[in-house]
Amino acid sequence: MLVMRPAQMADLNEVQRLAADSPIGVTSLPDDAGRLGDKIAVSETSFAAEVSFNGEERYFFVLEDSATGKLAGCSAIVASAGYSEPFYSFRNETFVHASRELKIHNKIHVLSLCHDLTGNSLLTSFYVLPELIGTPWAELNSRGRLLFMAAHPERFAESVVTEIVGQSDEQGDSPFWDSIGRNFFDLNYAEAERLCGLKSRTFLAELMPHYPIYVPLLPDKAQEAMGQVHPRAQITFDILMREGFETEHYIDIFDGGPTLHARTSGIRSIAQSQVVAVDVQAGTAGGTRPYLVCNGQLQEFRAVVLELDWSPGQPLVLSIEAADALGVGDEDSVRLVAV
């Protein structure tokens, strides 16, 4: 059974294995043991902290095969984007250039460097094994963290954002980066993203142009890349769009990938999930519809995918195996939402 749980320091080697295969652009998953170890340590501290509002906490989850102990995926939540340093994005805007005398009125698409999204909660670090793409376990790896947010709303902001990796080729070149960022740094896209993963995106972002960039002046390839999704990030994009996230307002400053945004209360897995009582029964047969189910705890948070026959208003009948995986019993409750 695949179980989503908080990452532990003992997972470091397995997490680095996942990070090594993650796409260029996922700077929150650097292939570096020191950085990943720090990431897990911060997460362990965050799960253990008493929190009444969203701050500097970072929650890192892994998807574990309970039979083998191998990891099949990972994902994370940053409670407040830009808490310790600005969170930069390009804002899509329209400038109007008009001349009454010439009777000309033009609307021009521009990109403005901003940190409008600072303070929002941020979904990061998504990776799932390729063979799980398109399965309910990919949904678990992404949406399980949304159930965690639903169970602990005081820890997160009123809005959530996520940056989707944009277009780049097999050599690690990005048409958007080559047209903008590379003019300010003697680095190709892959090198810039690697440097950001090992250090920080902020020090590069602060050297980007702080004046509006007129999109019609960019090469056609750069314009076409704006808002486009890297093939390996399509699974993340599709899942979150089904959750009610929106795009078009902001893009990533490095590769031009879309930045998704949603009100926390309106996200499907948060708005539609329900808390129900548990009824543990030996030998319980499986159902016909897949659900994401979590126990709602903190350090012992667990989430799984279960095939269930459940009716709203009724207790949730769980097998002993499922109850053990979730760490719940007859006196407990769980949160669930349909896949």
Image (spheres, helix red, strand yellow):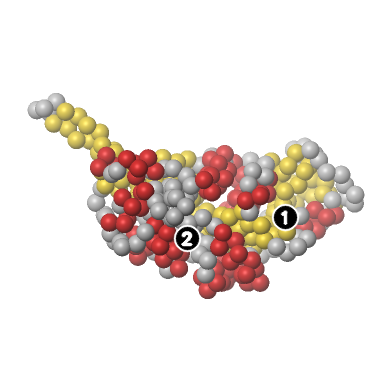
271, above or below 129, in the image: above
User: In front: 320, or 72?
Assistant: 72
Task: Report the Cα–Cα distance between label 2 and label 1.
Answer: 25 Å
Mark linked to residue 95: none
Mark linked to residue 27: 2
Q: Which residue is mark 1?
A: 2
Residue drawn at x 87%, y 44% is 285
Local SS, label 1: strand
> Picture coordinates of residue 312 (x, y %)?
74, 38
* Quadrant where the image shows the C terminus: top right
Local SS, label 2: loop
* Quadrant where the image shows the N terminus: bottom right
Residue that lies at the very extreme toward the bottom in this rendered image: 34
User: In front: 68, or 332?
Assistant: 68
> Picture coordinates of residue 241 (x, y %)?
53, 40
User: In front: 31, or 43?
Assistant: 31
